[in-house]
Amino acid sequence: MSVDIGMKKDVVKDHKKIYQSVRKDVVNNGREVAVVAAGMTQFGKARTDSTQEELVMDATRMALFENDLNYDPYDIKKMIDGTVISYFSDHFEKQLLFGAIIRDYLGLNPLQSVRAEGGGATGGLGVKTGYEMVKSGDADFVLVAGFEKMSEVSTTKGNEFIALASDTDFDFQVGGFYTAYYAAMATRYIHEFGITEKQLAKVAVKNRNNAQYNYFAQTNSKNPYSTKSTSGFINIDDVYKSNMIATPLKRLDCCLMSDGAAVVLLAEKNLARKLTKDPVIISGIGGGTDTMRPGDRPTTKGGLIKENLLLPHEKPEWYENMSYPGLHSFRAGRAATKMAYRMAGIKNPLHDIDVVELHDAFTSSELQTYEDLGLAKYGDGGKFIDTAEFDEEKGVFKEINPKMGDHTYVNPSGGLIGCMHAVGATGIMQVGNIFWQLQKKMEKFNDNDKLQVKNAKKGLAHSHAGTGSDVTVIVMSKDGE
Amino acid sequence: MVVGEKYRSKNREQIIVEQPYHIQYRHSFGEVSKFFKGLHEKKLYGTICRGKEHHMSGEDNLFVPPRADCPECMVPLEEWIELQNEDIRVYTFTTMYFSGENFLDKLPLTLINVEFPRYNNNYSKLISILITNEKDEINIDKKDLKIGMKIKPKFKEMPLEKIDASALYFVPAGIL
Ligand SMILES: [Zn+2]
């Protein structure tokens, strides 16, 4: 059964009680989609050594040649029957239709292709679009390539370009800067839930220090494209002492601007099983949206329940008296999560999911996203980071890639704060990392096993656009799990 | 050798050039032009929808920034209301010490989202600038800057043909 129209009518008639925010049924046409390969470049503040298409070629070569596929890479390339090219900005390199250059450069004409774009969630939407092509039967084997090169303009011009993704008649005219929008959200989030500066700073310490073991990460001081002043290990005092950007967010609370590319190959499940002995199944996928101006988000008492956004393990009485979403919440994140969990049959995320790559645009957004993913109750994101063992004296976590909750690991790659945010590549880099985690290949690609989550069976990649306008959530499982 | 090493080109020669690019846009504010004309006339306008039966809140929807159509009722909105003398509060705030290129010369600068407590606030938490010291326009985060603080709108002189949302700013209600 695909769509139950009768059900939709009832919901519309009864809309004052409950809104249908999330698709009810999973379309079942017998097709499933798997990830079979991933590749990415080393990320850097300025990869002036290569053009954008050259970087995408590097990531594509890695995907085809280094993922232990069962056939000759040239034969595998000939099986590709569709591409998705995901990139955010036309401004950063003043090039429209960049996708055409990429397809041409990779030798993938005249295959069907589409651009995916949705702000910071561009990469996640790219994977979701590729998933849809394969799921629908329009294609069996799709290459999803994402990239961004943000270094061709100054950092302040770059901030301005990114801010063109906010409402240019209103929000942009008075601030012109995403850190400020998130900072205002964080001020209110702290006010509502009593989040501490330390809880925010811990996120930065965790992600930045994880990144030191990620071969590809921009802040890894061994990366030849890293910048000295923004690489290496940090402790919590470094975060406190870093320059204030917009209260309460300091320099080390913020994600990076990056150059680089990432690629994944998606195949129909039966084909995937022929291509690799170790396919990773996309077992749940979802999308959500919210108002572009966070100030336009409703503040409805019990809104979380009224909008049908309770996750499977949550109880209505937790949130009945809370106003939701308000300016400080990512309703899109919950909508995407609910959709993905329903499809994947996730009943209790804290129990079911082993490893998460989530969109830590800012330390505050990582805490908020724990809540949206159901790893913590709404409002309890700060408490979840406190479940990881912290060495108070040294101001760092006792372990690299610390365990949170019972067996959850969040942003082993270092995320956007430690690894990179080359916007169109980010969501694909996350899916690539979860793929390698479930294949137990972190050691192969990083040359150390510090970031490998042992016995990881289910992972999740969360991609998010500025102030939460677009979110995708992708649940991935080892074949047979 | 780390896998990724294989994919780094050995070719290290690179030429980098400067390429300027300038754009001028001819932009219309369309059906909410009245809001911007209002700023020019030192008035703060919003639009309002009274189609309560379709609103999730069950109350009137106030739109600031204004919308020409209600997303819940799907009807064009003709009713504009003046808000400059309303009770207006700080809903949230941040003080920026860094910014996009277009605001660098104004730093530090405090941004706020405003709240109109008389309305349901579902579509009306406008983002704007808060000036705490009007005399020299130096605007740093003050200890008295807090959520719930009463504020009032002020208007900057701007020619109508160049007007934008920064013609509006707020000051603490205590300051003249
Ligand atoms: Zn209405």
Image (cartoon, grey):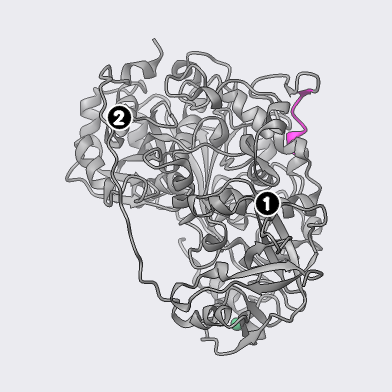
| Span colored in magenta | A384-391
Residue at the left extreme of this rendering: A110
Query: Could you say where residue A298 lies in the image, as x and y percent from the top left?
Result: 67, 67
Name the residue tied to disc 1. B95
Q: Quadrant of residue A188?
A: bottom right
Q: Chain of mark 1?
A: B
On residue A50, the disc is 2
Q: Please, is residue B57 above or below residue A36 in the view?
A: below
> Residue A107 at x, y = what percent?
19, 36
- How many angstroms separate mark 1 from mark 2 (CA)? 38 Å
Q: Is residue A481 left or right of residue A253?
A: left
Callout 1 amino acid: Thr
Q: Chain of mark 2?
A: A
At horizontal 50% and vertical 80% (from top left) the residue drawn is B32
Work out whether disc 1 and disc 2 sit on a shared chain. no
Say whether residue A389 is magenta.
yes
Please tell me which residue lies in front, A440 or B129: B129
The relative height of residue A39 versus residue B150 in the rendered view (above or below) is above
The answer to whether mark 2 is within 8 Å of ligand 1 is: no
The kind of residue on which mark 2 rests is Ser
